[in-house]
Amino acid sequence: GGADLVALALEDFTGVQIIHYAVIGDDGFGRIVDGLGGIEICSDTARGLSGQIIIPAGCTIVDGAAATFWVTNRSQDEFVDGNWRAVAGDDELSRLERERIAMFAVYKRIGSLGSPGTLTSLGQSVADTFVLDGGFSLSGAVDLAWSMRGGLRHLSIPVRSELTPDGRYVLYPTEPFSTTLGG
């Protein structure tokens, strides 16, 4: 249904008004990561495809291509005990969790930048990689990102997944958002 519908659904579920949003495509995400000098990704096992390691085991700074693989690939392989195998249970939910981890890594890198001016320069250099809603400007997005560095909370909404008859997965929250917030 698009970003507007996602914003409405989030408002309905959380009770928090969504004022602005940005949409970043897969290629754009990789360019942003490269512009930041990479992000740290931690994995218990080496991850890749077709016998090629893309994400090494442990914590490492990865480039945009590897970060994009991490957040977009729904069926990764892992290297365990000298053999490649499909990651058990790798699905859309695990991909979304990797995406969340990567976005927090991006914000951590933003926090390491020296000034809002450095972030503005980065934003201008990758401005063609994302779309802002009609009322949001690049300078507003930069100001917001700079103000949020280091101040984000990790929230995880408990969900159950159901497969629809037409083959789509739908996520349903299993508890109210107020419980997630701790109140």
Image (spheres, grey):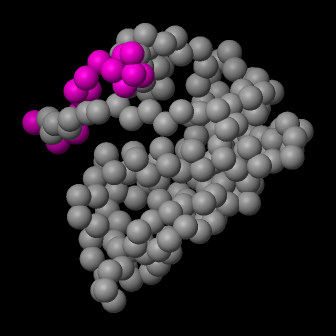
Residue 125 in view (yes/no)? no
Left or right: 19 in relation to 157: right
The correct choice, above or below, for 20 with respect to 125 in the image is above
Report which quarter residue 123 is drawn in.
Answer: top right
Residue 168 % position (x, y): 21, 39
**Residue occupying image coordinates x 44% and y 33%:** 155
Which quadrant of the figure contains the N terminus? top left
Q: Is residue 3 left or right of residue 163?
A: right
> What is the span of residues highlighted in magenta in the rendered image?
165-183
Is 137 above or below relative to 68? Answer: above
Image side of residue 55 versus residue 134, left or right: left
**Residue 24 shows up from this direction:** yes
Q: Where does the C terminus fall, quadrant-wise?
A: top left
**Magenta stretch holds residue 101:** no
Residue extending farthest to the front is 183
Look at 59% across and 14% down and name the residue there.
19
Q: Nearer the viewer, residue 58 or 19?
A: 58
